[in-house]
Amino acid sequence: MHSVVNLAAFALYEKGELKRCFAASGDDGVFASTGKVLSAERKVTSQYAEISNGDGEIVYVDDDGETFTLDALGEDIVFEIVSMMTGKRPDRDEELFSAPADIYSKPPVLRALFRW
């Protein structure tokens, strides 16, 4: 059994080749980051001021001055990816859970989502 705070992860493959992978948790920080950052990731992080803390780590500061590390934004990043695929965020729309998953597997939807 394994339990962590703020675990978020995704991987994007194109024709069997890994294009982007991201995984982070509150316990471990970012522990996987491969490939070019997706527009969905940039959309989330752009909502914050990006600064370097005393250790050289990039942190994100909201309008209230609260500071977040990238792992703390992981859930929002994954939810943004889901919303780009489905038009709905899973934390804001329960209908998403009753839709058949295969309706989101159409190639044009996936190509639009993962524009580099």
Image: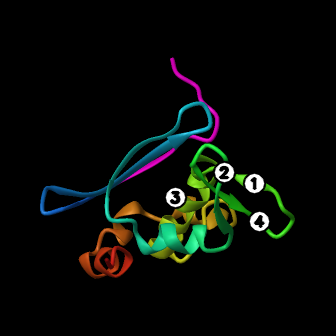
Evaluate if marks 1 and 2 touch, with contact meaning CB atoms under 8 Å apart: yes
**How much space separates mark 4 and mark 3, taking CA atoms?**
19 Å
Badge 1 is on which residue?
67
Badge 3 is on which residue?
78
- The image shows residue 10, relative to residue 2, as above or below, that is below
**How much space separates mark 4 and mark 1, taking CA atoms?**
7 Å
Badge 2 is on which residue?
53
Identified by mark 1, the residue type is: Thr
| Foreground disc of the pair 2, 3 | 2
Secondary element at tag 1: strand
Choose the circle earlier in sequence order: 4 or 2.
2
Badge 4 is on which residue?
62
- In the image: residue 85, left or right of residue 112: right
Segment tinted magenta in the rendering: 1-11
| Label disc, if present, on residue 20 of the rendered structure | none
Choose the circle earlier in sequence order: 4 or 3.
4
Crowd tier of the residue under label 1, counting other residues whose Cα lies within 10 Å: few below 14, some 14–19, many 20 or above:
some
